[in-house]
Image (cartoon, grey):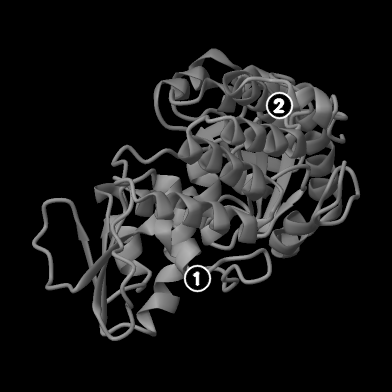
Amino acid sequence: MLEKASSGTHAHNTLSANQAFAQAEAALKERRVSEAIELYRIAEAGGFDGDSCSGARWVCHMLLGDFDSAWRESEKIDKHGRPDVNRFWDRKPLRGKRVLIRCLHGLGDTLQFVRYAPLLRKQVASLTIETQPVLKRLVQQSGLADHVITWGDPEPAWDQQIEILELPRIFRATLQTIPSPIPYLKGTPRQNIRSGQEKLRVGLVWASSRYNPSRCVPLAALSDMCRTPGVEFYSFQAGDNRQELTGVDLPIVDAFDRSGCIQAAADGLANMNLLITVDTMMAHLGGALGMPVWMLLPFQADWRWMLYRTDSPWYPTMRLYRQQGDGEWDVPISQMRTALQRLASGSDPAVSKAAAATASSSGSGPGSVQ
Protein backbone atom coordinates (compact mmCIF):
# COMPACT_ATOMS: atom_id res chain seq x y z
CA MET A 1 0.00 0.00 0.00
CA LEU A 2 1.51 3.30 -1.14
CA GLU A 3 0.87 6.82 0.05
CA LYS A 4 -1.84 8.70 -1.82
CA ALA A 5 -0.71 11.50 -4.08
CA SER A 6 -0.70 14.96 -2.55
CA SER A 7 -3.11 17.58 -3.82
CA GLY A 8 -0.23 19.83 -4.83
CA THR A 9 2.08 22.26 -3.12
CA HIS A 10 0.41 25.31 -4.69
CA ALA A 11 -3.00 24.37 -3.26
CA HIS A 12 -1.44 23.71 0.14
CA ASN A 13 0.23 27.13 0.17
CA THR A 14 -3.17 28.83 0.00
CA LEU A 15 -4.15 27.37 3.37
CA SER A 16 -4.12 29.26 6.64
CA ALA A 17 -1.79 27.97 9.34
CA ASN A 18 -4.66 26.35 11.24
CA GLN A 19 -6.04 24.75 8.09
CA ALA A 20 -2.62 23.41 7.12
CA PHE A 21 -2.09 21.89 10.55
CA ALA A 22 -5.55 20.28 10.55
CA GLN A 23 -4.95 18.81 7.09
CA ALA A 24 -1.52 17.59 8.20
CA GLU A 25 -3.11 15.77 11.12
CA ALA A 26 -5.63 14.16 8.77
CA ALA A 27 -2.89 13.14 6.33
CA LEU A 28 -0.84 11.61 9.13
CA LYS A 29 -3.85 9.69 10.39
CA GLU A 30 -4.28 8.24 6.89
CA ARG A 31 -0.52 7.53 6.74
CA ARG A 32 0.12 9.97 3.90
CA VAL A 33 3.26 10.86 5.80
CA SER A 34 5.27 12.78 3.18
CA GLU A 35 2.27 15.03 2.54
CA ALA A 36 1.83 15.54 6.27
CA ILE A 37 5.45 16.70 6.64
CA GLU A 38 4.94 19.36 3.95
CA LEU A 39 1.67 20.52 5.51
CA TYR A 40 3.28 20.83 8.96
CA ARG A 41 6.02 22.93 7.33
CA ILE A 42 3.41 25.21 5.74
CA ALA A 43 1.55 25.49 9.05
CA GLU A 44 4.72 26.51 10.89
CA ALA A 45 5.67 29.04 8.19
CA GLY A 46 2.21 30.53 8.56
CA GLY A 47 2.65 31.04 12.29
CA PHE A 48 1.40 27.81 13.87
CA ASP A 49 3.23 26.77 17.06
CA GLY A 50 6.69 25.61 16.04
CA ASP A 51 7.11 23.01 18.77
CA SER A 52 3.82 21.35 17.83
CA CYS A 53 4.89 21.20 14.18
CA SER A 54 8.35 19.89 15.02
CA GLY A 55 6.91 17.27 17.35
CA ALA A 56 4.49 16.10 14.68
CA ARG A 57 7.21 15.99 12.03
CA TRP A 58 9.32 13.99 14.49
CA VAL A 59 6.63 11.31 14.46
CA CYS A 60 6.50 11.41 10.65
CA HIS A 61 10.25 11.01 10.27
CA MET A 62 10.33 8.13 12.73
CA LEU A 63 7.51 6.40 10.84
CA LEU A 64 9.66 6.70 7.70
CA GLY A 65 12.74 5.37 9.50
CA ASP A 66 14.53 8.71 9.03
CA PHE A 67 15.87 9.01 12.57
CA ASP A 68 18.44 11.71 11.68
CA SER A 69 15.68 14.10 10.58
CA ALA A 70 13.72 13.28 13.74
CA TRP A 71 16.67 14.23 15.95
CA ARG A 72 17.00 17.52 14.06
CA GLU A 73 13.38 18.28 14.95
CA SER A 74 14.24 17.57 18.59
CA GLU A 75 17.10 20.06 18.35
CA LYS A 76 14.73 22.71 16.97
CA ILE A 77 12.51 22.25 20.01
CA ASP A 78 15.56 22.53 22.29
CA LYS A 79 16.53 25.86 20.74
CA HIS A 80 13.16 27.32 21.68
CA GLY A 81 14.12 26.80 25.31
CA ARG A 82 10.70 25.85 26.63
CA PRO A 83 10.65 23.60 29.72
CA ASP A 84 10.10 19.94 28.83
CA VAL A 85 8.70 17.83 31.67
CA ASN A 86 9.91 14.67 29.92
CA ARG A 87 13.55 15.80 29.75
CA PHE A 88 15.92 15.27 32.65
CA TRP A 89 19.34 15.37 31.00
CA ASP A 90 21.00 18.80 31.28
CA ARG A 91 23.08 18.22 28.12
CA LYS A 92 26.31 18.00 30.08
CA PRO A 93 28.68 15.05 29.40
CA LEU A 94 27.81 11.76 31.05
CA ARG A 95 31.18 10.05 30.68
CA GLY A 96 32.73 9.25 34.05
CA LYS A 97 29.66 10.41 35.97
CA ARG A 98 27.28 8.57 38.29
CA VAL A 99 24.14 8.36 36.18
CA LEU A 100 20.53 7.64 37.11
CA ILE A 101 18.10 6.49 34.39
CA ARG A 102 14.49 7.26 35.27
CA CYS A 103 11.73 5.22 33.61
CA LEU A 104 8.69 7.50 33.72
CA HIS A 105 6.78 6.46 30.62
CA GLY A 106 5.06 3.18 29.74
CA LEU A 107 6.27 -0.33 30.50
CA GLY A 108 6.85 -0.94 26.80
CA ASP A 109 9.08 2.14 26.59
CA THR A 110 11.23 0.82 29.41
CA LEU A 111 11.46 -2.65 27.88
CA GLN A 112 12.42 -1.24 24.49
CA PHE A 113 14.98 1.37 25.47
CA VAL A 114 16.63 -0.28 28.47
CA ARG A 115 18.75 -1.95 25.77
CA TYR A 116 20.85 1.22 25.88
CA ALA A 117 21.78 0.72 29.53
CA PRO A 118 24.78 -1.59 28.84
CA LEU A 119 26.20 0.93 26.33
CA LEU A 120 25.86 3.76 28.81
CA ARG A 121 27.27 1.65 31.63
CA LYS A 122 30.54 1.27 29.73
CA GLN A 123 31.04 5.03 29.72
CA VAL A 124 29.95 6.10 33.20
CA ALA A 125 31.31 5.63 36.70
CA SER A 126 28.14 3.89 37.91
CA LEU A 127 24.64 3.36 36.55
CA THR A 128 21.37 3.20 38.44
CA ILE A 129 18.02 2.40 36.82
CA GLU A 130 14.86 3.60 38.55
CA THR A 131 12.14 1.49 36.94
CA GLN A 132 8.46 0.73 37.45
CA PRO A 133 7.73 -1.59 40.42
CA VAL A 134 6.49 -4.47 38.22
CA LEU A 135 9.72 -4.34 36.19
CA LYS A 136 12.24 -4.04 39.03
CA ARG A 137 12.87 -7.76 39.44
CA LEU A 138 13.27 -8.38 35.70
CA VAL A 139 15.68 -5.49 35.16
CA GLN A 140 17.61 -6.49 38.27
CA GLN A 141 17.92 -10.13 37.22
CA SER A 142 19.08 -9.10 33.74
CA GLY A 143 22.16 -7.38 35.16
CA LEU A 144 21.85 -4.13 33.20
CA ALA A 145 23.01 -1.68 35.88
CA ASP A 146 24.99 -1.38 39.09
CA HIS A 147 21.81 -0.57 41.00
CA VAL A 148 18.13 -1.11 40.20
CA ILE A 149 15.53 0.71 42.27
CA THR A 150 11.87 1.62 41.97
CA TRP A 151 9.78 4.58 43.06
CA GLY A 152 10.15 5.25 46.76
CA ASP A 153 13.42 3.35 47.16
CA PRO A 154 16.47 5.24 48.46
CA GLU A 155 18.48 6.64 45.56
CA PRO A 156 22.23 5.99 45.35
CA ALA A 157 24.27 9.15 44.88
CA TRP A 158 24.16 10.42 41.29
CA ASP A 159 25.63 13.28 39.27
CA GLN A 160 23.40 13.18 36.19
CA GLN A 161 19.90 11.91 35.57
CA ILE A 162 18.20 11.06 32.30
CA GLU A 163 14.77 9.80 31.28
CA ILE A 164 14.92 6.50 29.40
CA LEU A 165 13.27 7.88 26.24
CA GLU A 166 16.20 10.30 25.88
CA LEU A 167 18.69 7.46 25.37
CA PRO A 168 18.13 6.80 21.64
CA ARG A 169 18.72 10.46 20.90
CA ILE A 170 21.85 10.61 23.04
CA PHE A 171 23.30 7.76 20.99
CA ARG A 172 21.92 9.34 17.77
CA ALA A 173 20.19 6.08 16.90
CA THR A 174 19.67 5.17 13.27
CA LEU A 175 18.23 2.03 11.71
CA GLN A 176 21.80 0.80 11.31
CA THR A 177 23.00 1.52 14.86
CA ILE A 178 20.15 0.18 17.01
CA PRO A 179 21.83 -2.03 19.65
CA SER A 180 21.41 -5.56 18.35
CA PRO A 181 22.49 -7.95 21.14
CA ILE A 182 19.37 -10.04 21.79
CA PRO A 183 18.30 -11.12 24.36
CA TYR A 184 19.08 -8.34 26.79
CA LEU A 185 16.42 -9.43 29.29
CA LYS A 186 16.29 -12.85 30.95
CA GLY A 187 13.47 -15.24 31.74
CA THR A 188 13.63 -18.61 33.49
CA PRO A 189 11.37 -21.42 32.19
CA ARG A 190 8.50 -22.36 34.49
CA GLN A 191 8.35 -26.13 34.20
CA ASN A 192 4.77 -26.37 35.48
CA ILE A 193 3.38 -25.11 32.16
CA ARG A 194 5.61 -27.17 29.89
CA SER A 195 3.62 -29.56 27.71
CA GLY A 196 4.57 -32.56 25.66
CA GLN A 197 7.33 -31.92 23.14
CA GLU A 198 5.21 -33.01 20.18
CA LYS A 199 3.30 -29.72 19.95
CA LEU A 200 4.21 -26.13 19.27
CA ARG A 201 3.64 -23.98 22.38
CA VAL A 202 2.24 -20.54 21.55
CA GLY A 203 1.63 -17.73 24.02
CA LEU A 204 -1.36 -15.54 23.18
CA VAL A 205 -2.41 -11.97 24.08
CA TRP A 206 -5.42 -10.66 22.14
CA ALA A 207 -6.16 -7.37 23.88
CA SER A 208 -4.17 -4.36 24.99
CA SER A 209 -5.00 -1.91 27.76
CA ARG A 210 -8.00 0.40 27.75
CA TYR A 211 -5.62 3.18 26.71
CA ASN A 212 -6.04 2.21 23.05
CA PRO A 213 -9.08 0.07 22.14
CA SER A 214 -7.80 -0.20 18.54
CA ARG A 215 -5.14 -2.59 19.85
CA CYS A 216 -7.72 -5.20 20.83
CA VAL A 217 -9.00 -8.21 18.91
CA PRO A 218 -12.05 -10.20 20.06
CA LEU A 219 -10.84 -13.63 21.12
CA ALA A 220 -13.60 -15.16 19.02
CA ALA A 221 -11.96 -13.67 15.91
CA LEU A 222 -8.94 -15.89 16.60
CA SER A 223 -10.94 -19.07 17.13
CA ASP A 224 -9.93 -20.74 13.84
CA MET A 225 -6.26 -20.04 14.48
CA CYS A 226 -6.56 -21.33 18.04
CA ARG A 227 -7.69 -24.70 16.69
CA THR A 228 -4.60 -25.16 14.51
CA PRO A 229 -3.52 -28.83 14.67
CA GLY A 230 -0.21 -29.41 16.38
CA VAL A 231 -0.38 -26.21 18.44
CA GLU A 232 -1.07 -25.62 22.13
CA PHE A 233 -2.12 -22.11 23.09
CA TYR A 234 -1.36 -20.49 26.44
CA SER A 235 -3.10 -17.26 27.42
CA PHE A 236 -0.96 -14.49 28.91
CA GLN A 237 -3.89 -12.08 28.73
CA ALA A 238 -4.27 -9.66 31.62
CA GLY A 239 -7.12 -7.35 32.64
CA ASP A 240 -10.83 -7.58 32.02
CA ASN A 241 -10.40 -9.20 28.59
CA ARG A 242 -9.11 -12.31 30.32
CA GLN A 243 -12.76 -13.12 31.08
CA GLU A 244 -13.29 -13.88 27.38
CA LEU A 245 -11.69 -17.26 28.02
CA THR A 246 -14.84 -18.38 29.81
CA GLY A 247 -17.08 -17.40 26.90
CA VAL A 248 -15.40 -19.42 24.16
CA ASP A 249 -14.94 -23.14 23.65
CA LEU A 250 -11.26 -23.09 22.76
CA PRO A 251 -8.36 -25.27 23.97
CA ILE A 252 -6.42 -22.42 25.60
CA VAL A 253 -4.52 -22.86 28.86
CA ASP A 254 -4.68 -19.83 31.18
CA ALA A 255 -1.01 -19.08 31.97
CA PHE A 256 -1.51 -15.58 33.39
CA ASP A 257 0.36 -14.94 36.62
CA ARG A 258 -1.81 -12.95 39.03
CA SER A 259 1.18 -11.35 40.74
CA GLY A 260 1.44 -8.80 37.95
CA CYS A 261 5.24 -9.08 38.09
CA ILE A 262 6.71 -8.88 34.59
CA GLN A 263 9.44 -11.32 35.63
CA ALA A 264 6.71 -13.95 36.05
CA ALA A 265 5.48 -13.22 32.52
CA ALA A 266 9.05 -13.49 31.21
CA ASP A 267 9.49 -16.83 32.96
CA GLY A 268 6.27 -18.11 31.43
CA LEU A 269 7.27 -16.94 27.95
CA ALA A 270 10.57 -18.78 28.31
CA ASN A 271 8.50 -21.98 27.97
CA MET A 272 6.92 -20.86 24.70
CA ASN A 273 8.09 -21.47 21.15
CA LEU A 274 6.25 -18.40 19.88
CA LEU A 275 4.31 -15.39 21.17
CA ILE A 276 1.32 -14.02 19.24
CA THR A 277 0.22 -10.66 20.60
CA VAL A 278 -1.66 -7.48 19.84
CA ASP A 279 -0.42 -5.91 23.09
CA THR A 280 2.75 -3.90 22.57
CA MET A 281 4.11 -4.31 26.11
CA MET A 282 4.13 -8.08 25.68
CA ALA A 283 5.62 -7.68 22.20
CA HIS A 284 8.48 -5.63 23.66
CA LEU A 285 8.97 -8.23 26.39
CA GLY A 286 9.07 -11.15 23.97
CA GLY A 287 11.38 -9.29 21.60
CA ALA A 288 13.76 -8.32 24.42
CA LEU A 289 13.82 -11.98 25.52
CA GLY A 290 14.88 -12.94 22.01
CA MET A 291 11.91 -15.20 21.38
CA PRO A 292 9.90 -15.34 18.14
CA VAL A 293 7.06 -12.81 18.27
CA TRP A 294 4.23 -12.37 15.78
CA MET A 295 2.51 -9.05 16.37
CA LEU A 296 -0.88 -7.85 15.12
CA LEU A 297 -0.72 -4.12 14.38
CA PRO A 298 -3.58 -1.63 13.88
CA PHE A 299 -3.49 0.60 10.81
CA GLN A 300 -2.44 3.67 12.82
CA ALA A 301 0.41 1.86 14.52
CA ASP A 302 2.86 3.74 16.72
CA TRP A 303 5.94 5.37 15.18
CA ARG A 304 8.29 2.66 16.46
CA TRP A 305 6.76 0.07 14.09
CA MET A 306 7.22 2.42 11.12
CA LEU A 307 5.32 1.88 7.85
CA TYR A 308 4.63 -1.21 5.77
CA ARG A 309 7.43 -3.32 7.27
CA THR A 310 6.91 -6.98 8.10
CA ASP A 311 9.93 -6.95 10.41
CA SER A 312 11.25 -4.67 13.15
CA PRO A 313 14.83 -3.34 13.33
CA TRP A 314 14.35 -3.17 17.09
CA TYR A 315 13.68 -6.91 17.43
CA PRO A 316 15.21 -9.33 14.91
CA THR A 317 12.92 -12.20 16.00
CA MET A 318 9.69 -10.28 15.38
CA ARG A 319 7.23 -10.42 12.50
CA LEU A 320 4.54 -7.76 11.97
CA TYR A 321 1.04 -8.45 10.63
CA ARG A 322 -0.65 -5.14 9.80
CA GLN A 323 -4.18 -3.93 9.22
CA GLN A 324 -4.70 -2.46 5.77
CA GLY A 325 -7.37 -0.09 7.10
CA ASP A 326 -8.86 0.99 10.43
CA GLY A 327 -10.46 -1.92 12.27
CA GLU A 328 -9.80 -4.44 9.50
CA TRP A 329 -8.38 -7.47 11.30
CA ASP A 330 -9.51 -10.19 8.88
CA VAL A 331 -6.54 -10.01 6.50
CA PRO A 332 -3.68 -10.01 9.05
CA ILE A 333 -5.40 -12.73 11.11
CA SER A 334 -5.83 -14.85 7.99
CA GLN A 335 -2.18 -14.33 7.04
CA MET A 336 -1.06 -15.26 10.52
CA ARG A 337 -3.27 -18.36 10.61
CA THR A 338 -1.77 -19.58 7.32
CA ALA A 339 1.77 -18.98 8.59
CA LEU A 340 1.02 -20.83 11.83
CA GLN A 341 -0.45 -23.81 9.98
CA ARG A 342 2.66 -24.00 7.83
CA LEU A 343 4.91 -23.73 10.85
CA ALA A 344 3.06 -26.33 12.90
CA SER A 345 2.75 -28.88 10.13
CA GLY A 346 6.27 -28.64 8.74
CA SER A 347 8.51 -27.91 11.72
CA ASP A 348 10.10 -29.94 14.49
CA PRO A 349 9.33 -28.20 17.83
CA ALA A 350 13.04 -28.47 18.64
CA VAL A 351 13.79 -25.95 15.90
CA SER A 352 10.51 -24.06 15.94
CA LYS A 353 12.00 -20.96 17.54
CA ALA A 354 14.22 -20.37 14.52
CA ALA A 355 11.42 -21.27 12.11
CA ALA A 356 8.89 -18.96 13.73
CA ALA A 357 11.21 -15.98 13.46
CA THR A 358 11.35 -16.24 9.68
CA ALA A 359 7.88 -17.56 8.82
CA SER A 360 5.84 -15.06 6.83
CA SER A 361 2.46 -15.41 5.21
CA SER A 362 3.37 -13.18 2.30
CA GLY A 363 6.82 -14.49 1.57
CA SER A 364 8.15 -10.91 1.54
CA GLY A 365 11.59 -10.26 2.94
CA PRO A 366 12.33 -7.97 5.86
CA GLY A 367 11.59 -4.35 5.18
CA SER A 368 9.56 -4.99 2.03
CA VAL A 369 6.66 -2.78 0.95
CA GLN A 370 3.33 -4.51 0.82
User: Is 101 placed left or right of 69 in the picture?
Assistant: left
Camera-nearest residue between 271 and 118: 118
Residue to which mark 2 is pinned: 27
Q: Circle 1 sits in a helix, a strand or a loop, which is it?
A: loop
Residue extending furthest right?
Answer: 363
Residue 126, image x, y percentages: 25, 80
User: Is 173 placed left or right of 243 in the picture?
Assistant: right
Q: Residue at x 67, y 63 (%)?
A: 175
Q: Residue at x 25, y 81 (%)?
A: 97
Within 10 Å of the Cα at label 1, are there few (<14), some (14-19), or many (20+) other Cα atoms? some
Residue to which mark 1 is pinned: 171
Camera-nearest residue between 135 and 188: 135
Q: Is residue 299 visible?
A: no
Res. 181 image quadrant: bottom right
Query: What's the residue type where badge 1 is placed?
Result: Phe
Give the vertical position of 255 relative to 225 (above or below).
below
Q: Circle 2 sits in a helix, a strand or a loop, which is it?
A: helix
Residue 165, image x, y percentages: 42, 55
Residue 32, image x, y percentages: 76, 32
Image quarter of the N terminus: top right
Q: Residue at x 45, y 19 (%)?
A: 243
Within 10 Å of the Cα at label 2, are there few (<14), some (14-19), or many (20+) other Cα atoms? many
Image quarter of the C terminus: top right
Tell whether label 1 touches label 2 (CB within 8 Å): no
Q: Residue at x 29, y 46 (%)?
A: 83
